[in-house]
Image (cartoon, rainbow, N blue to C red):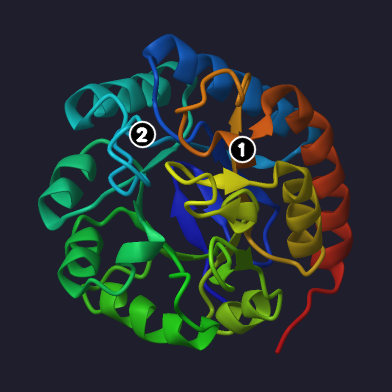
Amino acid sequence: MKDVSVGGLTVGNDRVLTVIAGPCQLESADHAQMIAGTMAEACAKVGAQYIFKASYDKANRTSLKGKRGIGMDAGLKVLDGVRAALGMPVLTDIHDAEQARIAGAVVDVIQIPAFLCRQTDLLLAAGETGCVVNVKKGQFLAPWDMDNVAAKVASTGNENILLTERGASFGYNTLVADMRSLPRMASTGYPVIMDATHSVQQPGGQGGSSGGQREYAPAMARAAVSLGIAGVFIETHQAPDADPLISDGPNMIPLDQMPKLIETLMALDRIAKADPVRV
């Protein structure tokens, strides 16, 4: 069983639950710090570990009309500000090898998007930064296929790897989450994360944008944590329906619902970690 150190935290399948949460995309420094501060307070209250996440560029939006974000330069400044002002680790995703080198100088965790999880050059570049690398399992992969994905990153000498489940393609515009994938990926020894909000996404489900069923996201989080895993990944926003072009609005959990959810998840985590599921 491998533990991964992230900015003073220790993330592992047998460690206290880590919550990775924040808006889908960065909007402004004030907005990021507001969400980060609210989440940090909620996690601290119940003893959960917390990593702030947000994207500076959503490069795989459904249509050209979708908002992509504030860009890498501005986004990394915002993330660096959150890290400095609030003293917490931060995560963002990247899309090519050059971004790995630039983002890796600022953030604690580099995330590989699910669509790019088999891109060897990208995985090697992420590993070479020395940052923690969170790889989302592709919607087209079986959980055991992540063995090879993790091995690519580890070949750089960097074994600070997290593996994230985010659902598998199940017909047009639909995903399904197979909970068997969590203990199977945990058998690699690496910490496993459940992406509760993207697993209820409906890719391209609204024609020009993705839909989602946020009402089921808390259930996905609760089910996953009850197995005994390292953490949950949740996108949250204070008003996810305010802007129809906001990325992943339909599957983000409203910010005011997060404290109660985290409290519940921590209760489940304590039970699960006493006797976690293994395969």
Q: Which mark is residue 198?
A: none
Q: Secondary structure at mark 1?
A: helix
Q: Nearer the viewer, residue 154 or 145?
A: 145
> In this rendering, is residue 236 above or below 212?
above
Residue most toward the left? 98
Q: Nearer the viewer, residue 226 or 8?
A: 226
Whole-percent x, y for residue 240 in the image: 60, 26
Whole-percent x, y for residue 222 in the image: 80, 55
- Quadrant of image for the C terminus: bottom right
Q: Amino acid at mark 2?
A: Gly
Q: Nearer the viewer, residue 31 or 279?
A: 31
Write down the quadrant of residue 125 in the picture. bottom left
Q: Amino acid at mark 1?
A: Pro
Mark 2 neighbour class, 10 Å CA radius: few under 14, some 14 to 19, many 20 or more = some
Write down the quadrant of residue 96 in the picture. bottom left
Whole-percent x, y for residue 70 in the image: 28, 24
Q: Secondary structure at mark 2?
A: loop
Q: According to the image, label 1 marks what residue?
A: 250
- Quadrant of image for the N terminus: bottom right
Q: According to the image, label 2 marks what residue?
A: 66
State the separation of the CA atoms marked 1 and 2: 14 Å
* Residue at image point 76% right, 60% down: 225
> In this rendering, is residue 42 above or below 147?
above
Q: Relative to residue 75, is residue 238 drawn left or right?
A: right
